[in-house]
Image (tube, rainbow, N blue to C red):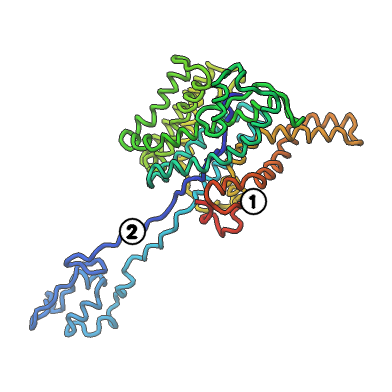
Amino acid sequence: MTHPTNGGSGEGVDEPSAQGSWFAKPEHGRTLGVSEAGWPAVPPARPGATPPRGPGGGPVLTDAVATGGVAAEATARFPEVLPRAEATSPLPKAESTLPEAAPAPKKPGRDRYLDLLRSVALVRVVAYHLFGWVWLSVVFPSMGVMFALAGSLMARSLSRPALSVVRGRLRRLLPPMWLFSALVLPLLFIGGWNPGKDPDTGGAWGWLGIVNYVIPIGAPAYPWEIANPPGFLETTWAEQGIGPLWYLRAYMWFVIASPLLLKAFRKLPWATLCAPLALTAVIGTGLVEIPGRTGEAVTDFAVYGSCWVLGFAHQEGVLQKVPRYAAVSGAALLMGFGLWWASGHLSEEGWDLNEIPLAQATWSLGFVVILLQYAPSWQQLPGRLARWDRLVTLANNRAVTIYLWHNLLIMATFPLIDLLYQLPFMDDKLSSALDSTYMLWSFVLIWPLIALAIVATGWVEDLAAKRRPRLWPDGRRTGGSGSRRK
């Protein structure tokens, strides 16, 4: 599968954006002729002046006194008219007419809705790579979701100097990848792979391509079939295990381009949002062909570029300014076009949108527009979702680890399940039952293996982020979701 669907922070490679922070109402200064209570102030009486009288001879109350906003002040200024105004007036005290004080501003924290979306995307990508259900690319286009979340976070971070932000993002991305490459590259060489004789990238360029295992400028090269030195992997283990690294390449280029993309978005928001769709229509439909893995890299950047920029629109508040009915209607039309285009350009995998660039671009963009239009910006998971709080936190803190290792771990489940056939009580009936539920057992077994990978390698993400290494960062010791990794 050349273009598997992802979920990782991969911000997948990063932490999600913090939304929903509260801002205190600015304090107003005192205006001439206006009391601090907000009512017109009573003018001071001239010495010896007679208080104004009404038609019946009674005192004329100013607006402030009549409304009770400054009854105490009026009493002090006209003691001969209202000697005991505070005690006798049926009007409420001034304090009772004041608006209630605004609540203290909340500290900005993790947007748990976005955290939840990332976690769902990770589970979905594992299920997709295990079961191969192509309809999952329609039900939940996790790659588009993940790039939009990463774009939102990137826009938020670019309130700081751009160079430091880009350097920080790359620092968090690369060390986990280096650890992964430190395992797979020796396995490739032991299995007999020679980059200089690779049919796709032979010669000196083949060896030069090894740099993509260190810095994912392009897609890492690997053989389609190779021996399996561990003895339990399939001959296509390189394609399955290394292939998903294309996401890290795409993410890195988005990060590098984000300072310029954000400037362009702030000047020409709609043009910047639609430009990747136009590029996809040119190179993703075959009008212009870019051969090899360079063409794949440019296509990936175009397909998910609009989702990344949509993250800018969400963070900058532009998306929220669009009337909901207009945004949802436009998204529905875009998604309808995507399905229509896919119906006439089905690949060998059928309705797998990962193999139909223009359909993937339009469907993912419309899908994410709806998700973000209805974003509730939770600071805590509500109701029954709260029981998943620790797992959601863990998945977001270890998104890169989960994404990097899950495919190799899926293949590792197969020889473990095969051991069940050797049990002495396994007869034909039980063997047949195991055959029919084989993939289900693999889906069950993959999660303990992912947990082991988190404990064994996940701490590298903490070192990359310059934090104290943690084996199981589910937020248990941090005292609440809002105080977790920011």
Q: Nearer the viewer, residue 49 or 410?
A: 410
Provide the secondary structure element on which disc 1 rests: loop
What amino acid does circle 2 point to? Lys
For residue 12, say whether it is visible: no
Horizontally, residue 363 falls left or right of residue 258, namely: right
**Residue sitting farthest toward the front:** 204
**Residue 257 picture location, percent across and down:** 41, 34
Q: Mark 2 = which residue?
A: 25
- Quarter of the figure with residue 43: bottom left
For residue 436, say whether it is visible: yes
What amino acid does circle 1 point to? Leu
Q: Mark 1 = which residue?
A: 471
- Quarter of the figure with residue 29: bottom left
Horizontally, residue 462 falls left or right of residue 17, namely: right
**Residue 318 picture location, percent across and down:** 36, 40
Q: Mark 2 vs mark 1: which is more N-terminal?
A: 2
Classify the position of the N terminus by image quarter.
top right
Where is 213 relative to 316, above or below? above
**Residue 367 picture location, percent across and down:** 49, 33
Q: Residue at x 56, y 38 (%)?
A: 8
